[in-house]
Each structure stands twice: as structure tokens, then as C-alpha cells.
Image: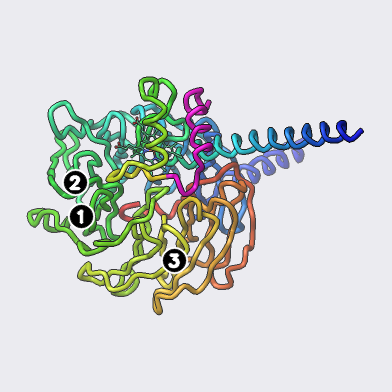
Amino acid sequence: MQTLSLVILVFLSLSVFADRLTDRQQELRYLIKHDCGSCHGMTLKGGLGPSLQSLALKNKPDELLFITIKEGRPGTPMPPWKSLLTNDDINIIIKILRKGIN
Amino acid sequence: MKLFFTLTVILFLTSCTTQNLRGTGDLGLIIERAIGQVKLVEHTTNTSLATIKGLGDLSHASIVYSRDERYGYVFGRDGGLTKIDILEQKIVKRIMQSGNSIGGAISQDGKLIAVSNYKPGGVKIFNADTLDLVANIPAVYAQGKQSKTVGLIDAPGQLFVFSLYDAGEIWVVDMKNISTPVITKFKNIGSLPYDGLVTPDGRYYIAGLFGEDGLAMLDLWHLEKGVTRVMNHYGKGKQKLPVYKMPHLEGWAMAGDKMLLPAVGQHEVLVMDQNWKQVKSIKVHGQPIFVMSRPDHRQMWVNFAHPRNDTIQVIDTETLKIIKTLKPGKAVLHMEFSPRGEHVWMSVRDESRVDVLNTETFEVIKSLKADKPSGIFFTNRAHKIGL
């Protein structure tokens, strides 16, 4: 019985975790569209900043994207996001960008 | 039978007149950015009249109006230029004029529409009636290099003025003779100009610089004097905060002998005197985006960049103190005052709402539904230089 409740508990917390993850993914998608979009275009086709559509990023390694998002590009309007986004967030964003937002 | 006929005719006529005759001076359009449509609104009774669909990607879209205040020209992010008849509540014409654009302007005589493009970088000028191309001005600044253009405005003398983001230049285009635009170029004006404005009297063009401190200023009465740097000392030695959204220079206030504008990378609104010297900075809630003057210049309303964009602050221009902090909701993107300033409309993007506030009591007097609203543009802009 005890093991069963433990299993249930683990299962519950797992599903909560899974929900959270998708919630956060949802939030990050929204952030990409609207807040990255204010400089990169809502469809990420480019604006003041370059296109972030998957094709445009094809030849850019994850590390470059990661460091750009985390630290920004000093001397350009690309801001550092490290105070608002965790490393995990940034990795999720890169995945979303690679898959394409639309 | 005859009576019936006359009655029908009378009914028909009255319905015609009540439907067709109306002014447009109390109308406006609101951008619903995510679904490519605009809302037609009326600000005498604060109501929404119609929705006009099919305008493409409207992130960062803006609108100018014909001088008869009947037509709105919508500049979309995707390079679309759409002419809307606000009386007929429909699109008259829509063209795709580039791959990626950022804003536009209408000429002094109302006959030309200019659009500022990121890709391919440059400015295109169209006949306001037909949207036929009149002039194409690629922003070529070095061999094979074309710059994004920003801060496009109209100025007296049938001028269009804009800045080249990648090149650090300001170009003045004289369209008095539409078949031969005369272009005056000012080079080395500073690094990464990100937006520009013209003072309400149409005399000074000012470009904000992202890459360095200060602002680039051009006296349009005296082009021969060239571009000068103002507020040079600003920001020196200070650690700049990240800017999550580019500030806008439109809507600056000149209150008596003072001017207020958003600082870049600081949570401050800057106050300049008539000699373009900074005389004060006002600490505010976040990185200011729009610093907009109530039409009587007595108050300045300020909104902020992500992640502090749920707040509005109101500055009294006499004392230069914050007199009110409001929390309208998530992502307050834009504000527009009624022509004489008794009300202000504000779009609360993430809550899909537009609120109308009384500017004396700060009370919300009306809330309208709108899908992810951004810019709000009332038709009285038609008669303002630089808008």
C-alpha cells in the first residue's frame, strides 16, 4: 500500500513537472513571438535584428546562439537575457527556434 | 399606394443620410498585431465600430492619415502597405512593397507616402492616391552594402528625413519635384541610429544613437550647418542596463522651455533645456519606451520595456515629479490621447484590452476588447508634422 501511494506520489509529481515544463515552453514561445519579435519580427523573419527562422540559423552552432542569447552582443541592441532566462530556458528557446515557431 | 411609395422613398432617403454623413475627426484605428487586422474606433463615445481584416504581419505596425482624415495608410512589418477607407470601413488597396519594413510618413502636401525598409534597406515613395511607386531610394552606403533605414519622418518643404542604422548616416530627401528627388546625405552622424523624430514645429530632426552616447541633431532650416551632437555627456561612465525593447522617440514633449525623452539603458526620463543640454533626469519604474505628452503639455505619460511593461507613470511637467503610477495590466504597448487630452487610450496587449482613462482622475472610464492590441492612432494625427 505504502509503495503504491509512493508510486502515485511520484507519478503525480512527475506529471506536475511535465505540466510545468509545457507551461514554461508555452511561456517561452510567447516570449519569442512577442518580445524577441519586437526586434526580430513576430514571424522571426528579421527586423532590427537578423532572421531567427530555422533556415537562417542552420549553419549557426548551438553554442553561438546560447552565448548570444545569454550575454547579448555588446555594442549592438541585442541585450543579454541572463537575468530573465535560465540556462534551461535558453536551451528550450534554441530548440524552439530550430524547430520553427510557426 | 402612392402614399406607401412616398413613405418608402422618405425612409430610404433618411436611412441614406444617417448612414452616410459623418465626420472622421473622432475616429481612429488600433492595430491588432497578431491576427493582422485593425479596429476602427470612435472616441466621442469610446466605442468600437468595425474590424478590418487581411493586413498581414502587423508587429510594429504604424499608421499615417490623409489630410482629409478619410484614409489610413498602414505600414506592416512584412513590407505591406495598406490603404484603408475609414468611412467605407474597408481596404482600398494593398501592396507588398518590400520584404521587411518599419514605418512610414506622409508628405506635407499629402500626396506622397514614404516607407522605410529594413530589407532591402532604403526608402520607397508612393503616390498617396494610387500607391504607384514614385521614387525608390536604396540606402547604399558602401560598395554593395545597403543599410536598414529607421526614423523616417516628413518635414516642411516637402521633405522626408531618415537615418541609416548600419551606416550611421542621415539622409534628407526633397520631393518638391517628384520626378527628381534631391538627396542630401550626412555621414558619420554616430553609431547605430535606432529611431528619429522631428520636433513638432518641423525644424529639428533628432536621431537616437544606440552605439554611443548622445543624440544626432540636424537643423532643417540650416542644412549647411550639418549634423551636430547634442547631450554628448549623457551616459558617460555609467553602467548601462540591458534594453529589451528599443525606445521610441515619437511623442516627445516640449513643455514650455523643457523637453523630455526616454533614456537608453537607464531607468530614467531625461529633461533637456532649449539649448539641448540635459538639466535633469527623473528616475522612473523601468526602461522608458514612449514618453508621450498630453496635448496641453501639462503631463507626460510613460510606458516601459519588458519585463516592466505592466506599469504606466505620469510626470507633471511643471514640477518634473511622478504624480501617478498605474498598473493597467501585462504589456502596455502604446498610448494615444484624445485630441484635446481629456482622455488617454492605452493598449494592454497580453490582456487583449484597450482601456480609456480620464487624464485628470486617472479612472478607467471604458474598456474595449481587442486582440493583442499594439499601436493606437487617431485621425487628428493627419495635421501634425512628423506624424
Judge left or right: residue B217 versus residue A83.
Answer: left
Q: Are marks 2 and 1 in contact (CB under 8 Å)?
A: yes
Identify residue type, mark 3.
Val
| First in sequence: mark 3 vs mark 2 | 2
Tell me where the magenta segment starts and ends, as one range.
A81-102
Extreme residue toward the right, this view: A1
Q: Residue B216 got which mark?
A: 1
Number of other residues with Cα within 10 Å of mark 2, as a class: few under 14, some 14 to 19, many 20 or more: many
**Residue B124's x, y, as percent?**
27, 33
| First in sequence: mark 2 vs mark 1 | 2
The front one of B1 and B327 is B327
Q: Quadrant of residue B99?
A: top left
Residue B386 visible in rendering: yes
Report whether mark 3 lies on the same chain as mark 2: yes
Q: Do the residues labelled 3 and 2 touch (CB within 8 Å)?
A: no
Q: Nearer the viewer, mark 1 or mark 3?
A: 3
Q: Which of marks 2 and 1 is in front?
A: 1
What residue appears at the point 73 percent right and 37 percent down from the top-left corner?
A16
**Residue B76's x, y, as percent?**
42, 36
- What element does badge 3 sit on? loop
Judge left or right: residue B168 versus residue B323.
Answer: left
- What element does badge 1 sit on? strand
Residue indicated by mark 3? B284
* Whole-number angstrom distance, CA of label 1 to CA of label 3: 24 Å
Identify residue type, mark 1.
Ala
Is residue A94 found inside the magenta-colored segment of the image?
yes
| First in sequence: mark 1 vs mark 3 | 1
Residue indicated by mark 2? B170
What residue appears at the point 42 percent right and 57 percent down from the top-left corner?
B287
What residue appears at the point 27 percent right and 45 percent down from the top-left corner?
A75
